[in-house]
Amino acid sequence: MDDHSTDATPAVVATYPEVRFLRLRRNRRFVGAANTGLHAARGQLLALLNNDAVPDPTWLAELVAALDRHPWAGFAASRLVLYDDPGRFHSAGDYYGRDGVPNSRGVWQADTGQYDREEEVFGACAAAALYRRAMLADLSGAPAPDAPLPPVFDPALTMYCEDVDLNLRARLRGYRGIYVPTARVRHMLSATGGGVLASYYCGRNFLYLLAKDLPGPVLLRNAGAILAAQIGFATEALRHMREPAARARLRGMIAGLLTWPRLLPARRRLLGDPAARPALLAAWIGRTAAPLPEEGDCDG
């Protein structure tokens, strides 16, 4: 997927005739581009890989092998390390804090072998992940498992946290995922985003996730931590108001506060669906990982 690039991407990709190349006529941000690509894809396993992520040659084979070994898993998360400092982690699987803040296992930590085991994790960073088509079809409301996929990522999120939303929705419907330590990817963080864009959309979308995805009991139980986190973000942004990113963060938070009711119809659909299992999602709020289930245990 070429999200209306202005560099030599089309010419570079043209040297690989086996690649199916789709180019958008206008930039549609990550969600629009990813949804277009997923709609066009026909495989039973669908991989996402950012343009600022450089995988090891065996990356995809390791993810596929992991899902083959663990049929209970709906997705596989990669071992993401920093591009310029590959001995330091960006993500060993993602999680969602009790304070309503998305985060990554191991972020900024030196790699000392602490994430060398396959484990069940809450979610995957979509910069480099593999998903079962059947799961994405279910989450997006496709009419049949092999039909072209409707939008998988929520267009309301535009960019940033769209993968967190997908992880929350997957857990809500009982899907599970695995972290694959041998599927290594070097990630050049924010090479085509970050800065003001990330600050604005994270400021807004953190609030959107609360409004859309979290069951009422989870919100009530963690209300103090959630409120404290939002106050902390606002205070920090006010302290650095001269910086564009800080001002963008505040604009995003204000936009989220003013527009979160737009997410209520989606919330009613998600949490009111008979297939929703809020207790399964609640059990993973604040939890980073779990041992792999015993062989034959495919519940959920």
Image: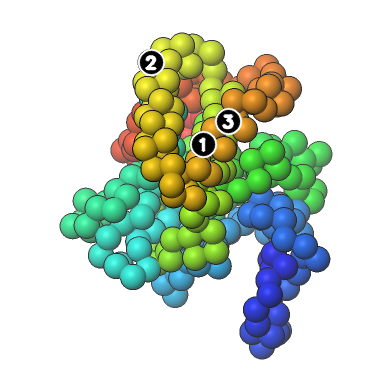
The x and y percentages for residue 102 are 44, 37
Residue 81 visible in the current orientation:
yes
Q: Amino acid type of disc 3? A: Ile
As helix, strand or loop, the secondary structure at mark 1 comes to helix
Direction front: furthest residue:
242
In x, y percent, where is residue 154?
67, 40
What amino acid is found at the position of numbered circle 1 in the picture?
A: Leu
Residue at image mark 2: 224
- Label 1 packing within 10 angstroms: few (<14), some (14-19), many (20+): many
Q: Look at discs 3 and 2 and give the one toward the viewer.
A: 3
In terms of secondary structure, where does tag 2 sit? helix
Residue 186, horizontal then vertical, whole percent: 40, 67
User: Mark 2 belongs to which amino acid?
Assistant: Gly
- Decide if residue 210 is on the left or right side of residue 102: right
Q: Vertical placement of 95 versus 50: above or below?
A: above
What is the spatial separation of the Cα atoms under label 2 and label 1, in whole angstroms? 20 Å
Name the colouring of the figure: rainbow
Compared across the picture, whether 299 is left or right of 98 comes to right
Numbered label attached to residue 254: 3
Q: Which residue is mark 1?
A: 250
Q: Is residue 281 above or below residue 35?
A: above
| Crowd tier of the residue under label 2, counting other residues whose Cα lies within 10 Å: few below 14, some 14–19, many 20 or above | few
Residue situated furthest bottom in the rendering? 15
Residue for point 39% across, 58% down: 80
| Residue located farthest toward the left when viewing the structure as drawn | 112
Residue 297, visible in the rendered structure: no
The answer to whether the residue labelled 2 contacts the one labelled 1, judged by CB atoms less than 8 Å apart, is: no
Mark 2 / mark 1, whichever is N-terminal: 2
Q: Earlier in the sequence, mark 3 or mark 2?
A: 2
- The residue nearer to you, when weighing 124 against 74, is 124
Q: Nearer the viewer, residue 284 or 215?
A: 215
